[in-house]
Image (cartoon, rainbow, N blue to C red):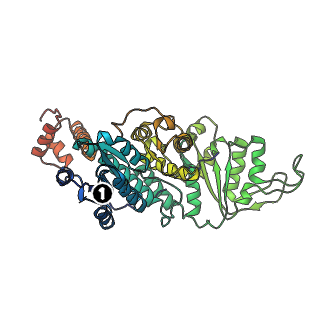
Amino acid sequence: MGDTMGETATAIPAEAPTRDLLVVEDDAGLQSQMRWAMSNDFVVHVAGDRSEALNIMERHRPSLVVLDLGLPPDPDGATEGLGILDSILAEYPGTKIVVASGNEDRNNAIKAVSFGAYDFFGKPVDIDQLRLILERAWQLHVLEEENRRLTCPSSKALDGIIAASSVMLDVCRVVERVAPTDVSLLIMGESGTGKEMFARAVHNCSGRVRGPFVAVNCAAIPENLLESELFGYERGAFTGAVRQTKGKVEQAKNGTLFLDEIGDMPMALQAKLLRFLQNRTFQRLGGREDITVDLRIVSATNRNLAGMIAQGGFREDLFFRLNEVCITVPPLREREGDALVLAHTFLHRFAESYRKGRMDFSQGALVALSNYAWPGNVRELENRIKRAVVLAQDNRITPADLGLADSGENDAFVTLRQARRKAEVDAIQKALASCHNNLSRAAKILGVSRPTLYSLLAAYDIRAAAK
């Protein structure tokens, strides 16, 4: 079958969202502590009750909320906190809410998570732990907002394609430039990456959008039937041909013909396809009349056509006809962040389809989704999410529901500080290697002064021999 994964993208960058955090806490001392501890990482707003919290939500739309469940008029219970949770999620469903609870109140914290809270933490507050939870929640919020932005109805350029990674956005930009032309397009990529979705996007963005989009899977049709499937046949052309029948080529007149798995096309049929591409005319099987068809060819394969040409399994002249422009859809393992964006998209889709209510992933599930290599690409991800939604015993998806190994929750995401450190260390090491540890030249390559480079070497404990 062709790649039919739902995926979206656009080349228009979004504005960086504001890192606003709302702390709902009635204890003035804790309010001050939280504001002081979090102000370097977030724009902190503080509220002491429901009315104040909802007013701040309306005015500032904070993406993150730290919510104490024990608030007046029920300071010893959780009714008020759960009520605020419900009100915020009903009005601002994308908000990530982290609830606070003491050991004796753990059951209410778990109940809050089942109602849609992102996570909970215990009292007394461990600021470092809370900061890590909020950083993870923020990164997830950014991914979800990017997904919502890219899939909004106003962005029709590549309808149905979900992508947030830079490599996929680069592919989408190429598609947007190629689609309005009439060049033959070859789409390459592993099975399950969404090649047919890109073919449909090319058709929908072209001047042929009012014409038909006709797909043929060259690997799914027996060799002895593929020619008649493509070019049609006349009555009496073979046993069982009781009437004249148009093939896929004629059906795609004034539209787009998508040849999926083109690498599986038999050599004899490759020659006939080449003749058609050269003059846009063909004859039905058993016919003598030349038929002219105006259409666009988009083909796709997961095979190495260059290697097949070298081994005599694919015609080089046909390859050049099909490959006026080539795009390669990267596998999911190379699309940083896309697995989580897609996972949430599929989760919401299937939860709604199977009437499961609001569902979310556990931290362990997010780690597992991030760490898994996805050999089956988007198709495998979609199938695993569907399986998880069907089998999950509650509304929080676990690694076991996904059929993935539970590797823990500590390495799901890195903080921006960690990412920045790694990037700087990598850049310094590459610069030093490129100039054989000549610090003056390395500093010039990095665009910093020599004293600054000395400071960075000391800060990151990088050993380099001065020259």
Which x, y percent locates residue 343? 48, 47
- For disc 1, the marked residue is 73
Secondary element at tag 1: loop
In this view of the protein, which residue sits in the foreground, 410 or 436? 410
In the rendered image, is residue 191 in sight? Answer: no
Query: Is residue 68 in view from this perspective?
Result: yes
In the image shown, does 237 or 258 lie closer to the viewer?
A: 258
The residue drawn where x is 74% and y is 51% is 230
Q: What is the quadrant of residue 232 in the picture?
A: bottom right
Q: Which residue is drawn at 49% across and 61% down?
A: 176
For the image shown, how many numbered marks are present on the structure? 1
Classify residue 37 as left or right of residue 377.
left
- Across and down, in percent, residue 107 comes to 38, 42
Q: How crowded is mark 1: few (under 14 residues within 10 Å), some or many (20 or more)?
A: few
Q: Determine whether, in the image, residue 322 is placed left or right of residue 417.
A: right
Identify the image quadrant of the C terminus: top left
In this rendering, would 317 be left or right of 11?
right
Q: Which of 21 and 379 is in front in this view?
A: 21
Image x and y of residue 385, in percent: 52, 43
User: How far from the left and from the top, in percent, is residue 287?
Assistant: 84, 55
Given the image, on which type of amino acid does mark 1 rest?
Answer: Pro
